[in-house]
């Protein structure tokens, strides 16, 4: 099997395809949103694709992920059907939450996506509960929880780290540090830019990694996940990255003065997809023709998802109280 940097070529190509799928899917949302048929608020993942792809390609289908309001990338990378996601965004009965959850409440149990929550930090204690159950059953599942730098402000972050460390649970804490909680900069909320060091008091491994370098993301996640699966306990990984769009919606928030355009431009030059594509081309691991074929295939899948969603029915009035708690 052909390998590069000790990673199989098939995995390297999956990385690129996964990142492309996330990016093109969200670009389609941006294109469709002005039609006013998609009513759910959307928190877009553009710019952070390397983290979801690099982490989830190390997971088995049986492993669990727990996510937040910015969840499209995580769910796509873990194997969720694009049609089911798109139908949920359109509020259709064929969506994963029967059209009642919207963008922030995606779930796909068969692929280990145990539900996402818009409550900041709420997924962490749930992920720890799942990890405890896995440990008690000795089923070798790993629970991965994705959260932003804003969730580090929550007490649930420290409580979950403490319990996971105490019980040596198979849990991986993935902080996607994009430096803003809504529009509040990290250093306006926290006394130091040192999220990965929060692991130290709990005697667990803490790493800081370039979240726009998918090779580094993949390798760091692989080590942590394999260690947790062997029973060596949890880890905290801080991936540094940047979201391109506003906190919620399809526009750029520098247009309304929330972030400097120069900052956005700098991060766009550091695009994780462009970096990885150029890496593959430079090392003759893929050709431009292959990249074009991959993109064309992804675009067809996304168009099929849109047609499926638009042709699906809305929940009926008689279903109003079904599947809600």
Image: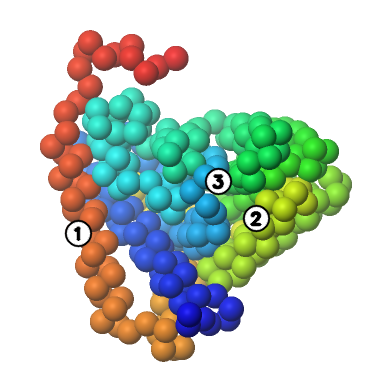
Relative to 61, say whether 38 is above or below: above
Quadrant housing the C terminus = top left
Residue 197, percent from left and from top: 79, 54
Query: Nearer the N terminus, badge 1 or badge 2?
Result: 2
Report the residue marked by disc 2. 225
Q: What is the tally of numbered marks visible in this picture?
A: 3
Residue at horizontal 33%, vertical 11%? 321
Disc 1 vs disc 2: which is toward the camera? 2
323 or 142, which is in the foreground?
Answer: 142
**Which residue occupies the extreme left position in the image?**
311
Residue 115, percent from left and from top: 48, 34
Say what secondary structure mark 2 lies in: helix
Residue 60, percent from left and from top: 52, 52
Relative to 146, say whether 53 is above or below: below
Figure coloring: rainbow
Q: Is residue 15 visible?
A: yes
Query: Nearer the N terminus, badge 3 or badge 2?
Result: 3
Residue 279, percent from left and from top: 47, 82
Q: CA distance from mark 3 to mark 1?
A: 29 Å
Report the residue marked by disc 1. 300
Say what secondary structure mark 3 lies in: loop
The reply, left or right, for residue 96 in relation to residue 302 is right
Q: CA distance from mark 1 to mark 2?
A: 33 Å
Label 2 near label 3: C-beta < 8 Å? yes
Relative to 35, say whether 287 is above or below: below
Residue at horizontal 59%, vertical 35%? 123
Q: Which mark is residue 63?
A: 3
């Amino acid at each position: 099997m052909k390998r590069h940097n000790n990673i199989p070529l098939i995995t390297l190509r999956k990385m690129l395809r996964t990142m492309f799928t996330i990016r093109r899917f969200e670009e389609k949302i941006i294109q469709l949103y002005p039609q006013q048929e998609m009513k759910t608020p959307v928190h877009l993942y553009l710019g952070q694709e390397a983290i979801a792809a690099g982490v989830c390609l190390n997971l088995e289908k049986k492993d669990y992920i727990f996510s937040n309001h910015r969840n499209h990338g995580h769910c796509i990378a873990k194997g969720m059907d694009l049609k089911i996601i798109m139908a949920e965004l359109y509020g259709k009965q064929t969506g994963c939450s029967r059209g009642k959850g919207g963008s922030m409440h995606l779930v796909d149990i068969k692929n280990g996506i145990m539900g996402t929550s818009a409550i900041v930090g709420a997924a962490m204690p749930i992920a720890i509960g799942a990890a405890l159950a896995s440990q008690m059953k000795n089923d070798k599942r790993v629970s991965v929880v994705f959260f932003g730098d804003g969730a580090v402000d929550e007490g649930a972050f420290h409580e979950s780290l403490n319990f996971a460390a105490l019980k040596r649970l198979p849990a991986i804490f993935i902080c996607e540090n994009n430096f803003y909680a809504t529009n509040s900069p990290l250093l306006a909320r926290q006394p130091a830019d040192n999220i990965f060091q929060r692991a130290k008091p709990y005697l667990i491994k803490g790493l800081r990694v370039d979240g726009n370098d998918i090779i580094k993301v993949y390798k760091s996640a692989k080590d942590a996940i394999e260690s947790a699966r062997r029973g060596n306990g949890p880890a905290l990984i801080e991936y540094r990255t940047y979201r391109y769009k506003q906190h919620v919606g399809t526009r750029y928030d520098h247009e309304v003065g929330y972030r400097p355009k120069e900052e956005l431009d700098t991060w766009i030059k550091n695009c994780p997809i462009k970096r990885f594509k150029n890496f593959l081309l430079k090392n003759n691991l893929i050709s431009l023709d292959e990249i074009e074929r991959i993109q064309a295939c992804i675009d067809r899948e996304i168009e099929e998802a849109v047609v499926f969603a638009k042709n699906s029915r809305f929940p009926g009035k008689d279903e109003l109280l079904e599947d809600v708690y």
